[in-house]
Image: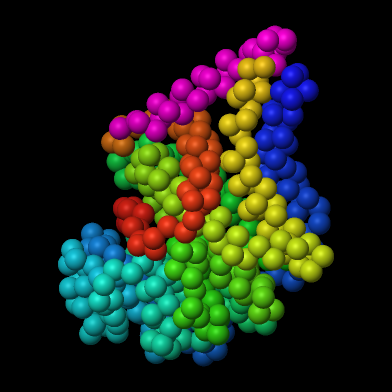
């Protein structure tokens, strides 16, 4: 029984250590000194772009986001702004129509069909050589688009992802632990870019070559994950562009972040299953290594971590150190559950926020596995509600 207890604790601990310590270290040691991505677009050499936004009931934020897009440093005659409204009912469409005289185009889906369905339906209306997907509640600095598009001067690049910068919710909030995780994720993508390719783009702000913006994406899959995978099949790599900054408000509460993680991770698991042949190390080499390390091994940690509790409990019957670890684990879980119920309008102590984020992420990851194993969910889409960044 003691051997079994050690295994129950050691397996998730080893996966966790690999994900957050060994894998980044391996990337630092193995990443090739690739030539730096192009970040400058000579005036007059700008390719045509379509800024594509899918929106559902975003009346509170969409006007500010459109103003930011119109202020981007990019020639107006080389830029199309297209909003796909997923049958919004809160006045979103009326707000977008006010921008028609400034070149903003609106297509209204007749019935709610989900974000992926709206992206699929946009294909025939996108005129740009590069299609840039933008969320309705983010803020993109005026100079962020040019380096994102410049990455496509490298002919091996099919997808270019922006760099998310996590901003605290206005008036405080209980989800401050997310900021550190986002920063880690962006640094990891930078290393993967140097090594071979990223395997997931930032859903808030990423760009694809027009040929990769296809009308047949499966509705139950995650397009910011599946697009880099499909690009690899077509002979392109995907990159993270540090200079292409996108400011993203954190969700207002840890509970809202938990629900978002369950939804996005379950779709991610279904996407990985759909593209599982890319995990073949013999055929896909470095790309498969990144896919295993960044996605599958990390997600397996979420599936297996509950096994650690009975393992620690068994070890606690024999070892004093295990008893102390069990007490610490129980306290940590209690603090995490408290953080999940923390009122969004109250400032949370940082140590509670960090513990809460870790606990919420692991519970959400396990719940995502359960949801994914039940089969594809209905594609109806409920966007993450965030405050826009002023």
User: Which residue range is magenta in the image?
Assistant: 315-343
- Residue 320 belongs to the span the image colors magenta: yes
Q: Main secondary structure of the magenta part?
A: helix
Q: Quadrant of residue 59?
A: bottom left
Q: Which image quarter is the C terminus in?
A: bottom left
User: How many numbered badges does the structure rendering display?
Assistant: 0
Residue 89 image position (x, y, % from top left): 19, 66
Q: Which image quarter is the N terminus in?
A: top right
Answer left or right for 101 relative to 156: left
**Where 361 sits versus 100, above or below?**
above
Residue depicted at x 63% and y 13%: 324
Residue farthest front in this picture:
374
Residue 328 image position (x, y, % from top left): 58, 18
**Where 283 sits versus 368, above or below?**
below
Residue depicted at x 74% and y 29%: 7
**Where 5 sits versus 293, above or below?**
above
């Amino acid at each position: 029984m003691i051997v079994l207890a050690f295994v129950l604790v050691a397996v998730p601990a080893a996966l966790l250590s690999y994900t957050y310590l060994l894998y980044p270290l391996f990337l630092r040691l193995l990443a090739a000194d690739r030539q730096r991505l192009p970040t400058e677009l000579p005036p007059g050499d700008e390719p045509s772009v379509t800024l594509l936004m899918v929106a559902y009931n975003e009346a509170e934020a969409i006007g500010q986001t459109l103003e930011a897009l119109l202020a981007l440093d990019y020639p107006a005659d080389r830029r199309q702004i297209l909003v796909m409204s997923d049958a919004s009912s809160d006045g979103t469409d009326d707000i977008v129509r006010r921008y028609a005289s400034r070149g903003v185009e609106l297509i209204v889906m007749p019935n709610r069909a989900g974000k992926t369905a709206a992206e699929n339906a946009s294909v025939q209306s996108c005129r740009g050589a590069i299609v840039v997907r933008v969320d309705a509640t983010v803020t993109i600095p005026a100079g962020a688009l040019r380096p994102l598009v410049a990455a496509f001067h490298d002919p091996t690049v099919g997808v270019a992802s922006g760099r998310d910068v996590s901003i605290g919710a206005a008036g405080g909030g209980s989800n401050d632990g997310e900021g550190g995780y986002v920063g880690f994720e962006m640094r990891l993508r930078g290393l993967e870019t140097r090594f071979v390719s990223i395997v997931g783009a930032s859903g808030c702000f990423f760009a694809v070559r027009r040929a990769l913006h296809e009308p047949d994406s499966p509705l139950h899959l995650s397009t910011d994950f599946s697009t880099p995978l499909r690009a690899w099949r077509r002979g392109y790599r995907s990159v993270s562009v540090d200079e292409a900054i996108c400011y993203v408000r954190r969700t207002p509460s840890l509970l809202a972040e938990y629900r978002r993680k369950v939804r996005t991770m379950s779709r991610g698991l279904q996407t990985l299953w759909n593209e599982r042949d890319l995990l073949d190390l013999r055929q896909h080499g470095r790309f498969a290594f990144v896919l295993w390390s960044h996605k599958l091994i990390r997600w397996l940690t979420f599936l297996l971590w509950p096994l650690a509790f009975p393992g620690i409990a068994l070890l606690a019957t024999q070892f004093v150190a295990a008893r102390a670890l069990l007490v610490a684990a129980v306290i940590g879980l209690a603090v995490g559950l408290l953080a999940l119920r923390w009122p969004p309008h109250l400032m949370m102590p940082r140590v509670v926020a960090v513990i809460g984020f870790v606990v919420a992420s692991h519970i959400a990851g396990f719940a995502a596995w359960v949801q994914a194993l039940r089969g594809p969910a209905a594609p109806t889409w409920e966007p993450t509600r965030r405050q826009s960044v002023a």
